[in-house]
Each structure stands twice: as structure tokens, then as C-alpha cells.
Image: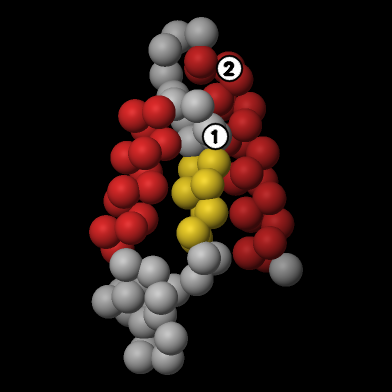
Amino acid sequence: MGLGVSNAAKHKLVGLLARKLEADGIYVGEVMITGTIKGTPFDRGQGATIEGKTVAEKFWELYTARKELRTTLK
């Protein structure tokens, strides 16, 4: 339950900060990861499907486009 509550709070904070800071030319966005990233301590060889490079690319896409607040990787 704690993880769900903290993710909901983070999600809300991203939206609030994005609106507040947009006038100053500051972009705020988030990449929600709902799977396991290959090669991390959580990857125990049991089905990690997300490449670290994919996460970096999603952050870069959000940052350069500056149109969406969030995206999800599964």
C-alpha cells in the first residue's frame, strides 16, 4: 500500500510542478516504469523486459518534445 500511495503523490506532484514552472520555461515530466529493468539488482533472471537504454530514450523524448507530462514503460 505504501508504494501505491507514494506513486500517487509523485504523480500529483509532477502535475502541480509542471503547471507552476511552465511559465518560467522549466519542464517537469515523469516516466512511470511498471516492469523490471534488465541488469539492475531487481533483475534476478526472471523476466526483466525493460532495457536501461529504453528508459533513457523515454526521458529524452519527454524532455525534447515537452508536450506530455508522463509516459509509462511496461
Tag 1: amino acid: Leu
Report x, y in % for residue 30.
Answer: 49, 43
Please name the residue that numbered disc 2 is placed on. 20
Please name the residue that numbered disc 1 is placed on. 69
Tag 2: amino acid: Lys
* Disc on res. 44: none
Q: Residue at x 27, y 59 (%)?
A: 53
Q: Residue at x 52, y 65 (%)?
A: 74
Report x, y in % for residue 44.
Answer: 37, 89
66 on left or right of 7: left
Q: Quadrant of the N terminus?
A: bottom right
Residue 23, placed above or below residue 57: above
Report x, y in % for residue 10.
Answer: 60, 45
Element type at mark 2 = helix
Q: Disc 1 versus disc 2: distance between alpha carbons?
A: 13 Å
Residue 64, placed above or below residue 52: above
